[in-house]
Image (cartoon, rainbow, N blue to C red):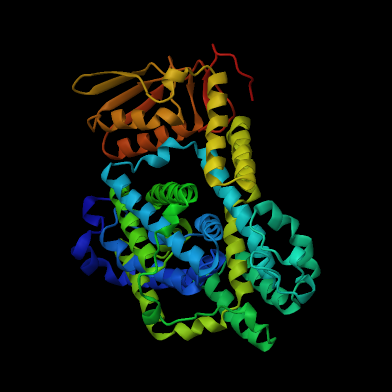
Amino acid sequence: MTNNNIPKDGIEGLKQNWRADMLSGFLVFIIALPLSMGIAQASDFSPIYGLITAAIGGLVVSFFAGSHLTIKGPAAGLIVIVAGSVSEFGGGEVGWKLTLGAIVIAGLIQILFGFLKLGRLADFFPLSAVHGMLAAIGIIIISKQFHVLLGQNPVHGWLDPELADPAKSKPLVEPFELIQAIPNTIRSYDHIALIVGLVSLLIVFGWPMIKNNIAKKIPAPLIVLIVAIPLSKFLAMNPKLFIHFDKSLLDTLSFNVSFKGMAQTTTFIKYVVMFALVGSLESLLTVKAIDLRDPWKRKSNPNKDLTAVGLGNTLSGLVGGLPMISEVARSSANVANGARTRWSNMFHGVFLLIFLLLDLEFSDIIPKPALAAMLIGVGVKLAHPREFGYMLKIGKEQLAIFIATILATLATDLLIGIGVGIIVKMIFEIISGVKIKEMFRAKLEISQDHKNIDIIAHSALVFSNYISLYKQLLALPSGKNVNFMLNKTAMVDHSTMENLHHFAEDYSRDGGRFLLVGLENHKQLSNHKYSARVNKQNKIKSK
């Protein structure tokens, strides 16, 4: 595409593209409406705050965002952290307000991340460990929402009177506890909730399989609501199994945050770090993924976008909302719906605000099992069996890192889980011949003339030194013929191989050529084009 075809940014972009962006914003609003409420409910927040968070993500963050097509709002991937924070801070209103304090501080840290130009933060983490963390989040979401789908909620005590004794009704929070509680839920399910939940689940997984072009344009969450709301009313479902708002928007909007949680220093720091780190990581990975799907191949400014998300989180936490990120499912729908600029995110926020002002009572007829079905759909996407197959295809060592991260996350928490994944990855690198002193700094020798640039890598190239490598690559002048010689590297890992291929594509779009050469003496650990390469002179077990 020529530069003349690229949509303009700013006010000119709004004037030029408002029709396409408003239509896409409306379609994304339809998806965001039930999901935002469901995410809030699953996070132990009042559902209205899920909508407020998404509205802030659209109405405020759009003006400062550094990405073109991402949608900001509450994410299912943060449910585990938010609910854990509310619980550890004492639960109920107290736990909610103390959690807000951690969200605000995390938002300020994200703003600082942006100013310090840490937008490449996602590149530090090995992709297999990141996917493992997301898969673990998906398993946890499924383990919680399965109970809600059947009309029970062991997180808050069982609804069934037969399970009301203290030994059985105690709240269950840990993933393995929730999984172990599944037989009790199956024995005590609410039959109406089961019907509504299964019908909703059938729509969530079945609707995308319909080949009709008109049907494809109608979001599955909208169909779920159209079917589940009248069905649950017709079957006279238990009133406890519907979403309820306690207050109107105007009554809700106030400073609800409390910083007294700082007194619980260890817990407070733990959740500030998790909100800031996991939220930033998910958001940056989404920005990266959506850039690859941008029809105009525009490059986002990750530092600016991280600052914008931090601003949104600070404001959201002050008024009672959840942490937000650039959310991948809604952002993907935004691209598919023909959005052209970041104003589509703003329009999605406008429609949410209109809903909050005019149709708040509508929420009282939305059945929780229907929202649970939508969240289970999200969880299955994160932890789909094909993720395991994909990791195995890249290499056995990637699958080992992936599984280690999942198990550690389920057994402990997200921070320890991603830490275990990184440690396992580094162990594989050391076995592969990577020297510890090479792990955090990429050593390159660069020579050039008026047409050509030769780069010789004198160190292993792995995830932990990719930021150092990337800084040096960004400094290269455009439009040159670049030969990146890797024959002296002990190892080029999977994360670096994938990142280098994307860099080569970007460099070629700017009129240059970027070739990876000198891998003839390296052994691929699988047949995947992004698999790790280990120098044959190093001793390591083959695939």
Q: In this image, 57 relative to 115: left or right?
A: right
Give percent across and percent down for residue 246: 49, 81
**Residue beneath the point at 52% across and 61% down:** 86
* Residue visible at 26% across and 55% down in the picture: 6
Q: In this rendering, does residue 216 appear at all?
A: no
Horizontal side, residue 236 vs residue 17: left or right: right
Give the tally of numbered discs: 0
Image coords of residue 476 (percent x, y): 25, 29
- Tell me residue 416's x, y (percent): 55, 41
Q: Residue at x 41, y 18 (%)?
A: 459
Give x and y (percent) for residue 413: 57, 47
Dividing the image into 4 quarters, which one contains the C terminus? top right
Residue at (53%, 27%) from the top-left corner?
Answer: 426
Residue positioned most to the top: 537
* Front residue of this view, candidates 3 and 426: 426
421 or 267, which lies in front?
267
- Residue 471 showing in the rendered view: yes
- Work out whether 130 lies above or below 435: below
